[in-house]
Image: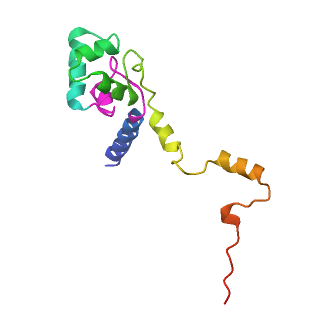
Amino acid sequence: MIKKLMLAIATLVASMGFAFAQVDVNKADAAALDSVKGVGPAMSKAIIDERTKAGPFKDWTDFQKRVKGVADKRATQLSKAGLQVNGQSKEGAPMAAAPAEKAAKPAKGSAKPADMKADMKAKPDAKPEAAKPAAKSAT
């Protein structure tokens, strides 16, 4: 029982690594291809069948011609998710880490720390809003 539990945990940890890894269509097995967002079991099978039938994919253009349902837009999405052909991402597609950059950007309208520092330098006697004492109410 413990061995099965340990095996399940090890498998889970190993599969989590695939979620953020670059996956090359010429080297990956079905499980690695399935780990890429946008690639399901049917597409994994189509990729492997085509690779077996006609050999490795030369580039993204070759991949798009040979795999049904992959046009420019879909190829760009797959590349963003970490899919590669011969170690190359599709041109115009940022690396897989790009979505993390979007999450790190502050929302519109919120003050940036650099702006706050500039304001403090311009007005050295000014206090931040949170540091101002509340007005005392007369009782």
Extreme residue toward the right, this view: 125
Quadrant of the rendered image containing residue 114: top right
Quarter of the image for the C terminus: give it: bottom right
Q: In this rendering, would 126 be left or right of 28?
A: right
Residue 82 in view here: no
Q: Residue at x 30, y 27 (%)?
A: 74
Characterize the magenta stretch by its predominant secondary structure.
loop
Quadrant of the rendered image containing residue 66: top left
Q: Position of residue 27 (x, y in %)?
A: 34, 18
Residue 131 in view here: yes
Q: Which residues are magenta?
A: 19-39
Q: Position of residue 137 (x, y in %)?
A: 66, 83
Q: Position of residue 89 (x, y in %)?
A: 41, 21
Asked if residue 100 is positioned above or below residue 109 in the image, the reply reads above
Q: In this rendering, would 33 be left or right of 105?
A: left
Asked if residue 63 is positioned above or below residue 38 in the image, the reply reads above
Q: Position of residue 87 (x, y in %)?
A: 42, 17
Q: In this rendering, would 43 be left or right of 8?
A: left
- Which one is in front, 75 or 126? 126
Whether 22 is among the magenta residues is: yes
Q: Residue at x 56, y 51 (%)?
A: 110
- Which one is in front, 95 or 1? 95
Q: In this rendering, would 60 be left or right of 118?
A: left
Whether 97 is among the magenta residues is: no
- Which one is in front, 132 or 93? 132
